[in-house]
Amino acid sequence: MKSSSPNNENVDQLLVEQKKRIDSLEHALAEAELNIQKYKEEWSALYDQNKELRDKNHRLQHDYELLRLQKGGFGFKMLLLSGFIGSLVAVLLCFAYIKLKPKEAHVVAFRQFQRENLFNYELAIHRGQFDEVEKSLDFNIERPEYQAIAPEIAFTKNIVKAAKRRCGEGK
């Protein structure tokens, strides 16, 4: 005995609609569970692959540390050694440059003139032999190796003449 009231028809229609909704939700839930399972498998595969990579990385780091310890800090020792040798070579090259650098002609000529004549000139001037010093200066100003210092020799000659006049006045 079914009563066919409009309320019953509405309830039946609501039940049918609810049944359809429940079926669609169950279908969506089943698909979601399949997707979850698929993503879990993919994640597990990626995690395993990542774990292998991490293990390989850890082994490489461990091997590097062992190699570094076996070498005993070879890089740092070589850095210190090369720095020390570089500094030593730089000092030696500076010393060689200072000793072997080409000298200017007037410096070389003046040093030679000084070595050859300075002591004799001082001694002669001390003894009052000004004419002898002037003759030597005239001779040296003509020498080709002293042409670079001719003005200095002329200046020295003028100083000797002035000293000769001063000493001549004092007597």
Image: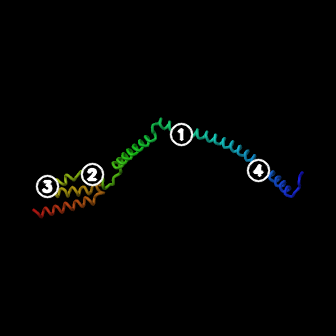
Q: Which one is closest to the eye, mark 1 or mark 3?
A: 1
Of residues 45 and 77, the one nearer the viewer is 45
- Which label number is shown at residue 112? 2
Q: Residues within 10 Å of mark 1 (few under 14, many from 20)?
A: few
- Which label number is shown at residue 127? 3
- Please tell me whether mark 4 sits on a helix, a strand or a loop: helix
| Residue that label 4 marks | 25
Q: Position of residue 36 (x, y in %)?
A: 70, 45
- Please tell me whether mark 2 sits on a helix, a strand or a loop: helix
Establish if 133 lies above or below 69.
Answer: below
Residue found 20% across the figure and 61% down from its top: 159
Q: State the image quarter where residue 149 is shown.
A: bottom left
- Please tell me whether mark 1 sits on a helix, a strand or a loop: helix
- Mark 3 is on which residue type? Arg
Q: Is mark 4 in CB contact (under 8 Å) with mark 2?
A: no
Left/right of residue 135 with respect to residue 10 in the rendered view = left
